[in-house]
Every structure is written in structure tokens, then in C-alpha cells.
Amino acid sequence: MKHDPIVNQSTIDAGDFVLRPLRKSDQGMVEFYGSDKRIARMTTSIPHPVPPGHAAGFVARAMSDETNETVWAIDGSHTGGAEVMGLISLDKMDRQQSEIGYWVAPSFWNGGIARRAVHALISANPLRDTTVFACVFQDNPASAKVLSNLGFTYLGDAESFSVARDAAVPTWTYHKNLGNGAD
């Protein structure tokens, strides 16, 4: 009998939901939401359409000890909500720095979930980062507003490749210093 690996990753309380490690049972909802063109187009890595096995591979990598990216499900089931409302991650860089990424399923948009999830993750600082970076596509002002409202500082314009769009897309880059409490 093969068991799922034990993930040494904290669960973070965000009030009416928690940020918890991904589990194999999440792959159906990750595939369902990731297949939504509105989600895929706002990420760099989700293809559209999503090919068979993509979500399973993503969840397996997220559960592996051999990854630089730590992924949490935004889970509201303990308060009667959905088990997967979105995902949030920290991609470990060097020198105690990470890049944050997140998406919220469309049925949960405009409820402040992204803001509360980013705030909870930054406040918990589970990777003990001194700096967190973020990039958002310029045609996604809602994500830019989340970051600005949480004290992230705009660094400049750049571009990132979007697999779903099959193109380089203009981005806004932000950072937040966590090490000494200064922004």
C-alpha cells in the first residue's frame, strides 16, 4: 500500500478559511478551476486548454520535497465553505526571498479572499523570508490592487511569458520587505 508523502508544511489560519498544504484529492478542483480560461490567462504556467494529467503533475510536484515552490490550497471547509477556493504559493529564491503567486476561483471573486490569503501568508512568513516579490499582468488590476493595499511597493514594468496566451505579457513587479518590518 502506497501512502501520500507527509508534507512538512504549516497550515495557516486566515479566519473564515485556512491555507493548507495541497493533497492528492485536490487535483480535481485544481483541474476544474485551472481549466477556466479566466484563471489560466492570468498565470504564467497554466496552459489553456489544460492537457490531461497537468493538474495531477502539479499537485504531485507541490507535494514533493524536491521543489522550490510551496503551495497552499485556500480552504473554507471548516466554516462550511468550499474545500478549494484557490491556490497561493511561495516560490523560493535565494537570500531569504520568495515570489508569491495566487489565484482565486471566479465563483469567489470580489469577496476579499485574495487579499486575506496574501495577508495571512505574509503575516505567517512560513519560509522566514526577508523579501517577497510579486508580478501581475498589467491587464489584471485587481491583483495589483491586492498587493498595493497590503503594502507591496511597485518596482517597475517587465514582462513574463504566459503559457495560456502563448505570448510575453507586460507585468507590474512589486516587493515587500519583511525582515525588519520596513516597507
Image (spheres, grey):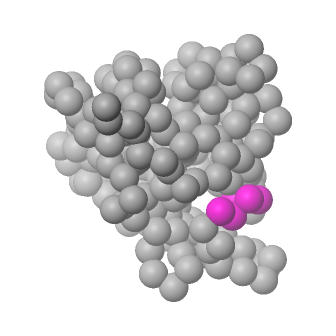
162 magenta-colored: no
Taking 57 as reference, is 99 left or right? right
The structure residue drawn at horizontal position 65% and vertical position 78%, both measured from the top left corner, is: 130
Vertical arrangement, residue 169 with respect to residue 74, above or below: below
Q: Inspect this view and state whether residue 24 appears.
A: yes
125 magenta-colored: yes
Q: Quadrant of residue 110?
A: top right
Q: Main secondary structure of the magenta part?
A: helix
Depth order, front residue of 71/166: 71
Residue that extends furthest to the front in the rendered view of this protein: 1
The structure residue drawn at horizontal position 65% and vertical position 73%, both measured from the top left corner, is: 128
The N terminus lies in which quarter of the figure?
top left
The structure residue drawn at horizontal position 71% and vertical position 47%, both measured from the top left corner, is: 12
Q: Inspect this view and state whether residue 103 appears.
A: no
Callout count: 0
Vertical arrangement, residue 42 with respect to residue 90, above or below: above
Give percent across and percent down for residue 31: 34, 25
The C terminus lies in which quarter of the figure?
bottom right
Taking 18 as reference, is 56 left or right? left
Give percent across and percent down for residue 173: 50, 64
Give percent across and percent down for residue 74: 61, 34
Taking 178 as reference, is 138 left or right? left
Give percent across and percent down for residue 62: 40, 48
Depth order, front residue of 128/118: 128
Depth order, front residue of 14/138: 14
The part of the chain drawn in magenta is 122-126
Q: Quadrant of residue 86?
A: top right
Depth order, front residue of 28/99: 28
